[in-house]
Image (cartoon, rainbow, N blue to C red):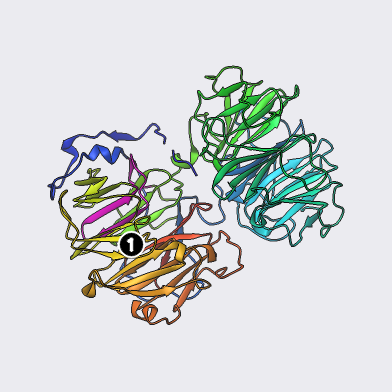
Amino acid sequence: MRRRRALAAGWWLVFLTCSDQAAEPVGPIGDPGDAVAGVTRLPSQYPKAPGGLSGWFSPGQRADLMLSGYGFNATGGALLFNHPRGLASDGTHLLLSDGNNNRVLIWNQLPAGNSSPDLVIGQPDFTTNNPGTGLNQLNWPGQVSVTRDGRVVLADTYNERLLVWNTFPTRNAQPADFEIRNGSLKWPWGAWTDGTRLVASATGGGAILVWLSFPTRGDQAPDLVLSGNGIGTPRTITSDGTFLVVGDHNAFTDRVGNFFWRAFPTTSRAPDFFASDPSDSRAAWMQGDVTADGKLVMLGRYLNIWAGVPADSTVRPQLIVNGYNFRGGDGGGVVFAGGRTYIMMYNANMVVAYQGIPTRADQRPDFAIGSPDPNTNTLLTNYVVTNPVPATDGKSLFVSSDFDRRLLVWTSIPDASGARPDLVYDLKFSPWDNEVSSTKLALAGGQLVAVWSRLPLNAELPDLVYRDQIGSVRFRDLRGVALDDRYFYLADEPANVVYVWRGLPSAGAEPAFTLSVNGPSRLSSDGTYLAVTQTFDHAVRVFRVAELSANAAGSRVGGVGVFNLPQGATVAAGALFVANTSFNGLHVWRNAEDAMASRPAGAILGTNAGPGKAPQIGDATLFWPGAAAFDGSYLWLGEFKFSQRLLRFGVR
């Protein structure tokens, strides 16, 4: 995923000046401008939550409201997308797979501007987005393909199937004619067909499935399975029937790029070559289309145009259009139709278009679809947060994002879905973790830590900024921060260490001691317990703060089969909450001692929690829960990567 901001009328910007600081520095600090680029105050109005609730959480409890979105089962409308993942055309229609909204939008005529779609499949109308498993429903759809005679194929990723419409859909929620399922089709991301052949990427199975004649029944096995040869997690597919190009996020284990078959494979043969993005080998894989005169146009970091399929990985594009900030990422794509070049951008949440094919490196798109212009990201202007990490003192709510490089502040606890924040901090670093303790807020990520000694409710700048090191401790990759009335903690994941200082340290202070923890990530302390998330160990380690020392081992909670890649653990008022990310559940222990004694959680939020269960948006279902915060009345839960929701659960 890539990182990227917008400003509109009616807001005012607080620039970085020393007069913005409201608290006295605690010790030697770096420049606040190292952490914060600017602060925007919004004219927000929302009902305030009463707080002071009593009770506890029950298994499968429904969430009360949702921020970072428009509400439950709500898209915001026909032209508000949420991370589009597929784009296709038959020369007359345009189809857009709107991934996080569980729908495919259809324009019956190729749009020449920001015009509304005519049809939606996967949903009964343009306002809803609940997932489902019926032939008229979707769960996180991926790439879509359409033939000249109107046959449509869609990768319905989290339903682990391909959906097939034998004739072009003509009404909302029109069910597919049949679905293709088989044991090899695991987490299908890409789909392509010319009406005769069909190709699908089995991303979860590390394979590319090829039917040399179009399937006529749902259990028909593929004729070819392309695997091995460095293929890792294949994603999107580009072809005109004479060649095959497949994007891969984990080729050869740790490379991103595309496998090329210069002639369409009819046997299970190795690809001819592998190529990364010509401008940035770390960028996402490329995805594209072939123009009427045979040019290969592929979106990666920039828009790449070859005269035809390159002979090998050394052939550079004839033109790289890099004068516009293409933000493709996991769902970038290109379609050439009606004399226009349509470009889908997952991370910019829109489709932009050129009249014709770009001919200059600095050429900018002519118009946008799903946005008022090619420069406005509607995710940012509607405060949809990627990787939201919440923190709260029970009076205010703070949400940070490493991907957006933002800190959003609600000065009061909101009591309505879709409530907009009061303050937006644009950051110069990517905070992976945060923590509120009493009047303090800390953010940490990478090689930087920012601390506010008073909660930033009036656009204050941080009082303490630590860059690269504290004392002799040099930061490698900070993934966790916590503080309480006794200690200040930082987790450095590649160093396998949690550093512990007594109080907020000066710039030259040495840790009081360190904790040896394998792969520590997000941290949380309530002054009684310290929780250390170990994402890749599938566990959480819980320490009693009063017993902390360099020799403290803590208690291991979870493990393989119990947790699957947990992103965050939170302790608050003696309770423990673990976001069991890939098992789609939030585990709740009212007393952390029960977890430390290996007793099962008293409640699990997420009715779809557990091994083998698909993530789902919904008020009772979860989609990759990532990080939580609890104030005694309200539990806030942010979802990770492929869902941007921030959910609130009240005790009952």
Residue 282: image x %, image y %? 51, 39
Q: Is residue 25 left or right of residue 276?
A: left
Q: Is residue 434 magenta?
A: yes
Determine the residue positioned at 46% across, 76% down. Answer: 603
Q: Which residue is mark 1?
A: 523
Q: Is residue 251 left or right of residue 176?
A: left
Q: Nearer the viewer, residue 25 or 62?
A: 25
Q: Is residue 64 left or right of residue 492?
A: right
Q: Residue furthest top?
A: 360
Determine the residue positioned at 12% across, 47% down. Answer: 24
The range drawn in magenta is: 421-446
Q: Is residue 623 left or right of residue 31?
A: right
Residue 143: image x %, image y %? 67, 45
* Main secondary-structure element of the magenta-colored stretch: strand
Please tell me whether residue 359 is drawn above or below residue 285 in the rendered image.
above
Please tell me whether residue 370 is drawn above or below residue 339 in the rendered image.
below
Task: Note whether residue 413 is visible.
Answer: no
Residue 248, located in which quarter of the rendered image? top right
Of the 4 image quadrants, the one containing the C terminus is bottom left
Determine the residue positioned at 53% across, 30% down. Answer: 279
Give amino acid for label 1: Leu
